[in-house]
Image (cartoon, rainbow, N blue to C red):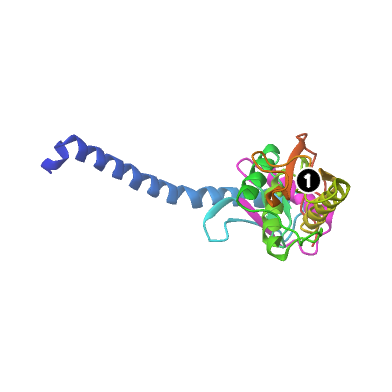
Amino acid sequence: MNFLRKPQFALIAGVLACIALAYTVGGASGPDIAQRLSASASAAIEQVDGDGVEAHFQSPNGWPSRHPVLTGAETLDETTRARIARAVAGLPGVGGIRWSDGDMMVEQHFSPLHCQEDVQALLRARTIRFEESSARIDVNSRSLIDEVATSLRPCLGAVIQITGHTDRSGPEDINIALSSERAEAVRQALIRRGIPGNVLLVEGEGSSHPVEGLEPTDPANRRIEFSVISTQPLVPTPVDTPGPR
């Protein structure tokens, strides 16, 4: 064991020991925390007469999670489901909630500005595309719309503006109309994916705001942008919280 007397070996050994301890403690505490949350959730559900409803604090891959999936509410009315979801969401340590049938309740502490950041990150790498000279969304962009909807769901308290842009390849009045139609097409696609229409506004800018550094006629100016125009959180209602599906 003389090699441990050398500082670099002693340092490496210490780091490895800390890593091992972290894995041991993490593995032991994760299930324990999930179990405690599950017990608290069961009591909260019972208090609001949520007979048959269970909260599962487990991720899809089987790891303990503070984001529960609620099951057993398929026959319950919307008001009852909302009451149950709020009861569980109010427990310390509980994160976002979703029902097993796919509906989700937002986390109240989530900053609406995160929506804009998350969506912009998606659109930096890819673009929502449309059929040529049309407001019909290209079939290959549907998965991107799915991801945008997922990024917007945790921030339903924000009012989001969807802005359409075109390049300068035609009359500006037509460009403005087309950019508005494309923004509306994205809005309708998000509504179909569960985003409330009353928090989505649309605007068409035509070719008046090209991407910085690009010529106005560059096709890359054809784009959709999202911006948060209100960060006033909404009080959850049965529309925002899990309802029957």
Task: Examine the rendering and report whether any part of residue 27 can be seen.
Answer: yes
Residue at 78%, 45% in the rendered image: 162
Q: Amino acid at mark 1?
A: Ile
Give the labeled residue for mark 1: 162
Image coords of residue 3 (percent x, y):
13, 42
Residue at 75%, 51% in the rendered image: 84
> On the rendered structure, is 10 left or right of 158?
left
Q: Nearer the viewer, residue 139 or 115?
A: 139
Q: Are there few (<14), some (14-19), or many (20+) residues within 10 Å of tag 1?
A: many
Residue at 55%, 51% in the rendered image: 34
Q: Quadrant of the N terminus?
A: top left
Question: On screen, 35 above or below 11?
Answer: below
Q: Which residues are magenta?
A: 67-95
Image coords of residue 110 (percent x, y):
67, 39
Q: Nearer the viewer, residue 202 or 233?
A: 202
Image coords of residue 198 (percent x, y):
85, 46
Residue at 77%, 41% in the rendered image: 157
